[in-house]
Amino acid sequence: MATTEFDTSLPSIRQVQTLIKQAATVDLKLLNGDLLTGRILWQDPQCVCIVDENSQQTTIWKQALAYIKPKS
């Protein structure tokens, strides 16, 4: 069953919140092999939303993510 609570005690949730606050550019690798680059705008229990350099917003289901990596 999907999580309906937003559990801010989880380190993964806190890490993504920090990336949002820092407006950090990240690489999001999807399980299908696609690589998306942008800033994370928000997250909820099921999804994250990123915005790319063209101001295009994309909502991604967390279950489709392989990893999130901050760009250096």
Image (cartoon, rainbow, N blue to C red):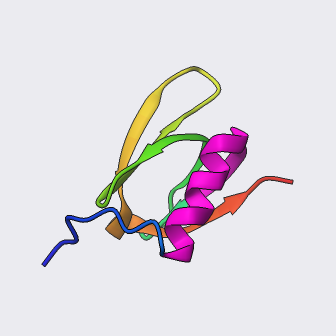
- Identify which residue, 59 or 9, lies in the foreground: 9
Residue 33 place in picture, x, y as percent? 50, 66
| Placement of 23 over or under 36, stated as above or below | above
Q: Please identify the quarter of the rendering in which residue 6 is found.
A: bottom left
* Residue range of the region highlighted in magenta in the rendering: 10-28
Q: Quadrant of the C terminus?
A: bottom right
Q: Please identify the quarter of the rendering in which residue 49 is found.
A: top left
Which residue reaches farthest right? 72
- Identify which residue, 13 or 48, lies in the foreground: 13
Which residue reaches farthest left? 1
- Residue drawn 41% across and 37% down? 58
Q: Is residue 68 left or right of residue 50?
A: right
Residue 43 place in picture, x, y as percent? 42, 50
Q: Quadrant of the N terminus?
A: bottom left
- Identify which residue, 2 or 7, lies in the foreground: 7
Residue 20 place in picture, x, y as percent? 60, 44
Assess whether residue 14 is covered by the magenta stretch.
Answer: yes
